[in-house]
Image (cartoon, rainbow, N blue to C red):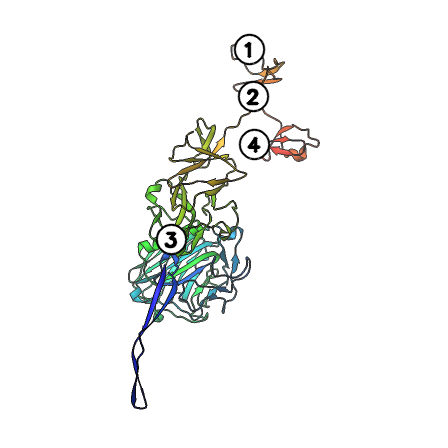
């Protein structure tokens, strides 16, 4: 929304050489547009003091060191730079170094860092607290690395505050010598990306919240974090330092605890000098979760909110379909425009894209045309086996089922890629029970294209039942060799002849064992086309097709 600013200048009286001279200034109104409403995380603008995001504010290529990370809060004088740092982190835009197709900044866990120099952030009692949000993917490190700081300011311990994220635990402290405390999560931690929230409430408590679930709480009597409670300095000194990203602020004892520096990928860092309401917190967490493909914890149902407060994913409507929540969407007041997405969870198996490219960075895809449009999906958490038969469709459908929640009409269709290669069809249903009245869409090359997903729709994947139509014409009476364990005189259905057959094996208690060997590719010197063996190394049946040995596997097209 645009804002209009009006400045009015009125009558003034001034004196020259003891003579009173009056200058009458007619009312003058200066009218001008000051621009659009401030963009902020989750649309929460009040007391936003730092906003660093890897997809906006870094002007280098993949693999190049970051010496300047531009702050997007609109209130900082300085950016986060490498001034006085031992070394700089590296910009990453490809492969597994991204988080949900978004770029990151990689810190080495030794001495990479950035800082704001003489640009400080103090939080006074009137602001009641502070909140720090971080999207991070820590590398697996030794459990001895107990203080891998992603954010730190001042003198670690007595006079400062900071937050550390590692693969074994998260840790936070606030000015211990002034009524603060230090504490860490009892949660073992993870190397997967998460949304971390360090929530400090003056005079009461502070919390480490991960994916919107409180993981640790500590009581504090600290009433503010002003200059008297932080040993600030524009450069790293032995017992003081600047606001620092990726390492400890002070220079003293930096190498303690296996280096007090973050080891891993950072996607975003957000700092508020205030207490946030539950709604404000949920808006910010929703923005970060959708952008980075992270599922907010559903131990207690958590909705997802747009910047205007609209519920864009309703936990009650979702019910059991609350696993691996992710999707695409556009929300201009939080600068969100996610055009390709995949859950970062280990069992996330589908990718949604606005076009047919399923690998390029988020910014490279077809745009979503309108603001405040979302398409989010979540699944029931079941396995990915094809066990449920659909009569009339001649397919088995996957046990895992997804449910759609859609806001707005700008996302008319979406393209879907499934990691599982056994699916031949995508199945769409208005309810969770799939039958032959539902829609069956065949795969196109290796994806499902232009799928019209609508609000509250369900979808899953189908695997065909393989069969070949029989030959037509009159069969030739069989001239057979029969090997059987059946008793021909005891009415055990002795098979005497099979039309068009040459060899019959019959038994209810025995099995046929084909030639077994290790590595037929090297063991058989001169294979013959059609030769069939069981490879005991790979534990599969292999057929020689005249050129090479191929694995026999079910394919239905």
* Any part of residue 349 in sight: no
Crowd around label 3: few <14 · some 14–19 · many ≥20 (10 Å)? many
Label 3 sits on residue: 285
Q: Residue furthest bottom?
A: 17
Crowd around label 4: few <14 · some 14–19 · many ≥20 (10 Å)? few
**Residue 378, position in %: x, y?**
40, 43
Mark 1 in CB contact with mark 4 (< 8 angstroms): no
Mark 2 in CB contact with mark 3 (< 8 angstroms): no
Label 4 sits on residue: 553
Say which element carries label 2: loop
Mark 2 in CB contact with mark 1 (< 8 angstroms): no
**Residue 534, position in %: x, y?**
60, 30
Label 1 sits on residue: 488
Question: In the depicted view, which residue is nearer to us: 10 or 450?
Answer: 10
In the picture shown, does residue 425 fall above or below 65?
above
Q: Earlier in the sequence, mark 2 or mark 3?
A: 3
**Residue 196, position in %: x, y?**
40, 55
Q: Using the rendered view, name the quadrant where residue 320 is placed.
A: top left
Q: Earlier in the sequence, mark 2 or mark 1?
A: 2
Q: Using the rendered view, name the quadrant where residue 533 is placed.
A: top right
């Amino acid at each position: 929304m645009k804002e209009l600013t009006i400045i009015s200048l009125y009558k003034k009286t001034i004196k020259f050489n003891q003579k009173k001279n009056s200058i009458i200034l007619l009312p003058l109104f200066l009218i001008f547009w000051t621009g659009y409403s401030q963009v902020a995380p989750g649309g929460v603008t009040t007391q936003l003091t730092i906003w660093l995001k890897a997809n906006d504010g870094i002007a280098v290529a993949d693999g190049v060191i970051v010496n300047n990370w531009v702050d997007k809060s609109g209130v900082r004088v300085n950016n986060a730079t490498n001034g006085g740092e031992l070394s700089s982190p590296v910009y990453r835009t490809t492969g597994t170094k991204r988080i949900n197709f978004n770029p990151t900044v990689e810190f080495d866990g030794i001495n990479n860092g950035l800082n704001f120099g003489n640009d400080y952030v103090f939080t006074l009692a009137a602001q009641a607290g502070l909140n720090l949000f971080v999207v991070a993917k820590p590398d697996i490190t030794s459990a001895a690395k107990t203080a891998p700081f992603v954010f730190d300011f001042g003198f670690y311990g007595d006079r400062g505050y900071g937050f550390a994220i590692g693969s074994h635990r998260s840790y936070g402290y606030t000015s211990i010598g002034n009524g603060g405390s230090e504490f860490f999560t009892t949660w073992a931690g993870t190397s997967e990306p998460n949304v971390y929230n360090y929530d400090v409430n003056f005079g009461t408590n502070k919390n480490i919240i991960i994916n919107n679930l409180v993981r640790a709480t500590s009581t504090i009597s600290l009433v503010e974090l002003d200059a008297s409670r932080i040993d600030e300095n524009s450069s790293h000194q032995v017992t003081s330092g600047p606001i620092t990203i990726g390492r400890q602020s002070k220079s003293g004892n930096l190498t303690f605890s296996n280096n007090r520096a973050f080891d891993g990928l950072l996607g975003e860092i957000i700092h508020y000098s205030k207490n946030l309401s539950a709604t404000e917190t949920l808006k910010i967490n929703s923005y970060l979760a959708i952008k980075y493909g992270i599922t907010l914890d559903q131990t207690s149902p958590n909705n997802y909110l747009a910047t205007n407060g609209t519920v864009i994913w309703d936990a009650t409507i979702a019910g059991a379909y609350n696993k691996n929540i992710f999707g695409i969407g556009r929300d201009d007041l939080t600068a969100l425009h996610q055009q390709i997405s995949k859950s970062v969870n280990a069992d996330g198996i589908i990718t949604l894209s606005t076009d047919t490219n399923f690998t390029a960075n988020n910014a490279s895809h077809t745009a979503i045309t309108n603001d405040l449009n979302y398409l989010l999906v979540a699944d029931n958490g079941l396995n990915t086996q094809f066990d449920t038969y659909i009569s009339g469709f001649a397919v088995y459908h996957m046990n895992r089922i997804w449910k759609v929640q859609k806001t707005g009409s700008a996302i008319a269709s979406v393209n879907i890629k499934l990691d599982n290669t056994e699916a031949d069809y995508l199945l769409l249903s208005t309810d969770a029970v799939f039958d032959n009245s539902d829609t069956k869409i065949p795969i196109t090359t290796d994806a499902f294209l232009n799928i019209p997903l609508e609000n509250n729709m369900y979808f899953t994947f189908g695997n065909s039942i393989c069969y070949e139509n029989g030959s037509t014409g009159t069969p030739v009476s069989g001239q057979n060799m029969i090997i059987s364990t059946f008793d021909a005189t005891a009415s055990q259905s002795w098979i005497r002849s099979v039309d068009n057959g040459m060899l019959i094996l019959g038994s209810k208690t025995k099995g046929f064992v084909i030639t077994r060997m290790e590595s037929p590719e090297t063991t058989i010197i001169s294979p013959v086309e059609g030769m069939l063996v069981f490879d005991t190394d790979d534990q599969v049946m292999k057929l020689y097709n005249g050129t090479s040995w191929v694995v026999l596997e079910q394919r239905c097209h």
